[in-house]
């Protein structure tokens, strides 16, 4: 049976068992990686929650305007972002409080693979929003406020997706390779 303990204490106990098998440097690297992944998950919760809120506001706006294409596109986006926020929150809690019998290395490997999946998903979400933005610009023209808001938002989303793909993805792949060499 598990007792309710401090998540940091659970991580320290897992680290101590890892130290007896591997070098201290490697164990510290694993612990730092887990803490970094947990912080990344928490940041994703905030970003996805903000995105879902903005998307929900946009959905309400388009419902009031009677624009079905944008309504369905933003409804899908709202649902996806809300799901991403929920899942990231669940993963952050799961990683911070390892379950009894869970291997520290296995948990970290699973987390890294999940993060790689999220990077690919960000690319898909950016492409969908860029398509919606192109449709809004085509329909309402460049000088309109609606087109400007969509263009600025799409620029932010696409920049984030590019950052994920060009910076975060290689970092995650390197971490996974180092973990595979250690374990």
Image: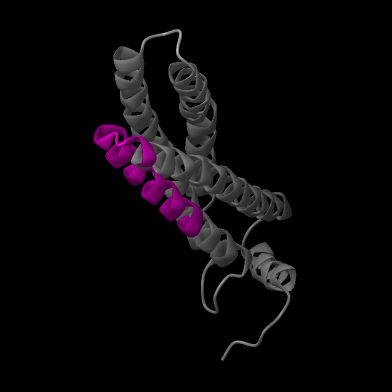
Q: Which quadrant does the N terminus fall into?
A: bottom right
Q: Main secondary structure of the magenta part?
A: helix
Magenta-span inclusion, residue 6: no
> In percent of the image, x 56 and y 50: which residue is there?
45
Q: Pinpoint residue 75: horizontal percent, then vertical percent.
A: 34, 45
Magenta-span inclusion, residue 80: yes
Q: Position of 100 compared to 30: left or right?
A: left
Q: Pinpoint residue 160: horizontal percent, then vertical percent.
A: 52, 28
- Say which of 141 and 133 sits in front: 141
Above-or-below relation of 166 to 53: above
Above-or-below relation of 20 to 137: below
Above-or-below relation of 119 to 159: below
Q: Pinpoint residue 46: horizontal percent, then vertical percent.
A: 60, 47
Above-or-below relation of 88 to 119: below
- Say which of 142 and 161 sits in front: 142
Magenta residue span: 64-87
> In percent of the image, x 35 and y 35: which residue is there?
65
Residue 39 in view: yes
Q: Pinpoint residue 6: horizontal percent, then vertical percent.
A: 73, 75
**In this figure, what is the number of numbered marks?**
0
> In percent of the image, x 48 and y 61: which residue is there?
106
- Say which of 10 and 13 sits in front: 10
Q: How is the image coloured?
A: one colour
């Amino acid at each position: 049976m598990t007792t309710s303990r401090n998540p940091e204490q659970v991580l320290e106990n897992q680290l101590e068992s890892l130290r007896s098998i591997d070098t201290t440097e490697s164990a510290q690297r694993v612990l730092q990686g887990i803490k970094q992944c947990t912080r990344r998950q928490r940041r994703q919760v905030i970003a996805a929650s903000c995105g879902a809120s903005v998307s929900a506001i946009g959905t309400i706006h388009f419902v009031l305007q009677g624009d079905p294409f944008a309504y369905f596109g933003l409804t899908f986006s709202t649902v996806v972002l809300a799901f991403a926020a929920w899942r990231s929150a669940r993963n952050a809690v799961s990683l911070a409080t390892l379950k009894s019998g869970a291997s520290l290395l296995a948990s970290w490997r699973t987390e890294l693979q999940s993060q790689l999946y999220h990077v690919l998903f960000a690319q898909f979400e950016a492409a969908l929003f860029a398509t919606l933005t192109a449709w809004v610009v085509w329909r309402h023209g460049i000088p309109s406020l609606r087109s400007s808001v969509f263009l600025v938002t799409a620029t932010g989303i696409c920049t984030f997706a590019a950052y994920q793909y060009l910076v975060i993805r290689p970092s995650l792949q390197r971490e996974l390779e180092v973990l595979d060499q250690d374990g």
